[in-house]
Image (cartoon, rainbow, N blue to C red):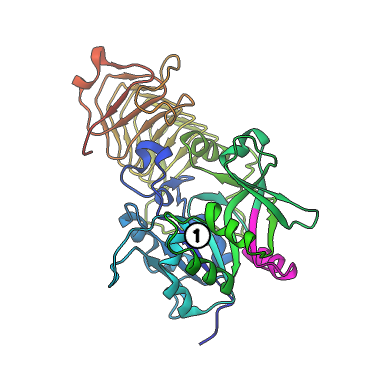
């Protein structure tokens, strides 16, 4: 058996509550992206492109669809006899059984998996960011600086820095101070939630901190290593990186894909993004229909107009319907004579005929104003919208709705229909 130099532990158990109704039935890393992919495809593809062939995927919240997507790892060439991809849900232990309570606690509960490979280094990843990164370059940096821990950092606008853990470094990139989501940040160097640990350092720190409630890397493990006098360095990443943690950032990241020269290019031969693909027929675009500045998935039928949108596979867009500035996920059905403006429509949604979505002026959402913003309409998966209704902006809908849910056939801006149990 060949000893693994570095294995990856991919944290994919998060609910992603700031994505609202999009994650009511599935984990955030399983949310669709770019018409063809799931968010988790990006870190998995980065691993295999970086020569890492052993990946533990830690799942927890609504794992079914994520597990089905990953399977035995074949699309990413991770179906190996030794190594490959392993899904690691929380499990019953003889002493006690507990959920993963924090990022570091989740890794601690899988010490046995890591000890089996006894690697020299362990790479910790989040399953919910969009980026391309060669982890081998980061490992070379970790080795050349003789660091115990290396954090990937990214320069964010200073006004956004309070959303992240930020670091202060000396001229050699050695970290001298940490601030976890500071109110008044003194640096714009944000931690990307990507860490390389020398294996012994990680193992000792996790064992030492095993009783810390909700033990987390940013809040507990990294500061602990710093207090112990470990050398912690910042690896400054210069490529494209997007935390798609909010509906606004998720929508923006998708819309950037359809720019004339996209900042994030999905079509590079030398750094492919792999995914599990269904065998589907080609797209069908009916005579008289138009598609401009858009991505349209396989098996999709367009009988209307699509502009500046990202459309998944198996979607049907009816005659004379107009879809603008929107994300439509797999197998959604849009009726005839509809207008859809700046919406995120999840998988399996059925929209009737003569429906207008994204109408009028913005108003603050009445259900979760911190989530449903940016003028977007968000419709959760397998929801149904009846014929002849007009829906405003900053609206959230989930469930099979009927005409009775729409007074005067209207759902005004800032309103929500959240059907319990849907």
Observer able to see residue 257:
no
Horizontal relation, residue 173 to residue 122: left or right: right
Residue positioned 59% across, 67% down in the render: 197
Q: Is residue 335 magenta?
A: no
**Span shown in magenta:** 134-152
The 10 Å Cα crowd at callout 1, few under 14, some 14 to 19, many 20 or more, is many
Q: Nearer the viewer, residue 316 or 344?
A: 344
Which residue in the structure is indicated by mark 1?
274
Q: Nearer the viewer, residue 55 or 326?
A: 55
Horizontal relation, residue 352 to residue 103: left or right: left
Observer able to see residue 76:
yes
Q: Is residue 138 magenta?
A: yes
Horizontal relation, residue 387 to residue 268: left or right: left
Residue 364 location (% of width, % of height): 42, 20
Label 1 secondary element: loop
Q: Quadrant of the C terminus?
A: top left
**In the image as oriented, which residue stretches furthest toward the top?**
408
């Amino acid at each position: 058996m060949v000893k693994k130099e570095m294995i990856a532990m991919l944290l994919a158990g998060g609910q992603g509550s700031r994505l609202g109704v999009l994650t009511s039935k599935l984990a955030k890393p399983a949310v669709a992206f770019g018409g063809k992919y799931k968010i988790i495809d990006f870190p998995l593809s980065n691993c295999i492109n970086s020569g890492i062939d052993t990946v533990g995927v830690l799942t927890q919240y609504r794992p079914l669809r994520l597990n089905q997507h990953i399977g035995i790892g074949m699309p990413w060439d991770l179906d190996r006899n030794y190594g490959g991809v392993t899904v690691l849900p929380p499990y019953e232990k003889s002493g006690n059984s507990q959920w993963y309570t924090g990022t570091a606690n989740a890794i601690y509960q899988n010490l046995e998996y890591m000890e089996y490979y006894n690697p020299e280094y362990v790479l910790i990843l989040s399953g919910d960011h969009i980026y391309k990164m060669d982890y081998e370059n980061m490992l070379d940096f970790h080795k050349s600086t003789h660091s115990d821990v290396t954090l990937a950092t990214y320069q964010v606008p200073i006004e956004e820095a309070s959303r992240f853990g930020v670091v202060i470094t000396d001229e050699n990139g050695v970290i001298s101070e940490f601030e976890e989501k500071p109110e008044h940040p003194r640096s714009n160097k944000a931690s990307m939630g990507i860490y390389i640990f020398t294996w012994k350092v990680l193992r000792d720190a996790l064992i030492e901190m095993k009783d810390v409630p909700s033990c987390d890397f940013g809040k507990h493990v990294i500061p602990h290593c710093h207090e112990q006098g470990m050398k912690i360095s910042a690896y400054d990443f210069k490529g494209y990186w997007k935390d798609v943690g909010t509906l606004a950032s998720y929508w923006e990241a998708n819309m950037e894909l359809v720019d004339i020269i996209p900042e994030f290019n999905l079509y590079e031969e030398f750094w492919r993004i792999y995914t599990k693909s269904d065998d589907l027929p080609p797209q069908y675009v009916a005579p008289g229909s138009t598609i401009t500045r858009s991505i349209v998935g396989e098996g999709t039928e367009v009988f209307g107009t699509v502009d500046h949108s990202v459309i998944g596979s198996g979607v049907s867009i009816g005659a004379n319907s107009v879809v603008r500035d929107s994300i439509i996920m797999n197998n959604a059905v849009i009726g005839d004579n509809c207008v859809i403006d700046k919406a995120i429509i999840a998988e399996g949604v059925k929209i009737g005929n003569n429906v207008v979505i994204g109408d009028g002026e913005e108003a603050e959402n009445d259900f979760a104003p911190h989530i449903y913003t940016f003028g977007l309409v968000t419709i959760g998966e397998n929801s149904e919208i009846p014929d002849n209704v007009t829906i405003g902006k900053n609206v959230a809908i989930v469930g099979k709705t009927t005409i009775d849910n729409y007074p005067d056939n209207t759902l005004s801006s800032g309103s929500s229909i959240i059907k319990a149990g849907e």
